[in-house]
Every structure is written in structure tokens, then in C-alpha cells.
Image (cartoon, rainbow, N blue to C red):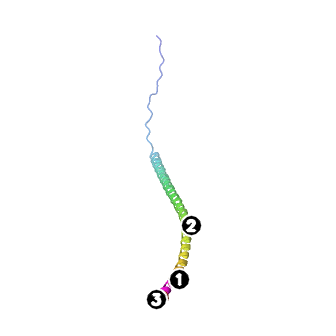
Amino acid sequence: MMKIPTTKMNLTTAPVTRPSPRKKEKAEVLKKLIAAAETEDSDEDMEAGNAKLDYNNVTKELETYRKEISDLTTELEGAKKGSFELEEKLKTLQGAQMTHRLSDTTFSEQKTTAQKRIETPTNTCTSRL
């Protein structure tokens, strides 16, 4: 038989390393920085979300104001048209009033003439009796 050479193997386990206090501090500082960065990111995300909501609200208000302005412009144009029509009616009524005044003067003249006739009876009626 042959002899198989054997070598001694060093089967020592790797020593358990414990972090040094300085490494622990660095790790905790890094954890805190990461947590702060995540918080800042979430704060920035919230601020961005709030800004987006504010923008949407302002946009809606702007659309509302534009619609109100459009409605008021339409109403103003209608009022201008109505005003023009009212001016025309007023001119017509003023013309009718002038005609009425003329007819009033004519009527009052006719009335005074008639009253004079009534007050001064003609002699023809009394002479027949």
C-alpha cells in the first residue's frame, strides 16, 4: 500500500471582529443622516404636493374668474344693446310728448273758444221767443 501524504490544514476560524467604538459612532451618524435625508425628501415631497394643490386651486379660481368675466361681458353687451333700445324708445316717447303738448295747446285753445261761445249766447235764440 501506498501511503497518501497528508498535510496539516490550518482550520482555525476567523476571529470574530467587533466594531470599534469609532465605527459604531460613524454608523449611527450615517443612519441619522439617512433618516434625515429621507425625512427631508418626504418634506420636500409634501411641499411639492402642497404646491401642486395650490397651483390646481389657483387654476380653478382663475377659470372661475374668467367665466364670471365672460358672463359679465355678455351681460354688459346686452345692457348696451338694451340701453340703445331704451334710448330709441325714449326718443319716440319724447316725440309723442311733444305731439301731445301741441295737441294740448290746440285742445286748450279750442276749449277756451268753446267756453267763450257758451258764455256769450247768440241773440238768435232769444229773438225767436
Query: Mark 1 falls on what kind of element?
Result: helix
Per the rendered image, the range of residues in magenta is 112-118
Q: Position of residue 41 (x, y in %)?
A: 48, 50
Q: How many marks?
A: 3
Residue at x 55% of width, y 62% of height: 77
Name the residue type under label 1.
Glu
The residue under label 1 is 109
Looking at the image, which is closer to me, 124 or 115?
124
- Residue 126's disc is 3
The residue under label 2 is 84
Name the residue type under label 3.
Thr
Q: CA distance from mark 2 to mark 3?
A: 63 Å
Looking at the image, which is closer to me, 52 or 84?
84
Query: Mark 3 falls on what kind of element?
Result: helix
Q: Position of residue 46 (x, y in %)?
A: 46, 52
Looking at the image, which is closer to me, 32 or 121?
121
Question: Vertically, is 14 above or below 27?
Answer: above
Q: Is residue 27 visible?
A: yes
Q: Would residue 114 be counted in the magenta stretch?
A: yes
Location of residue 89 (image quadrant): bottom right
Question: Vertically, is 107 above or below 14?
Answer: below
Q: Earlier in the sequence, mark 2 or mark 1?
A: 2
Q: Residues within 10 Å of mark 3 (few under 14, many from 20)?
A: few
Q: Residues within 10 Å of mark 2 (few under 14, many from 20)?
A: few
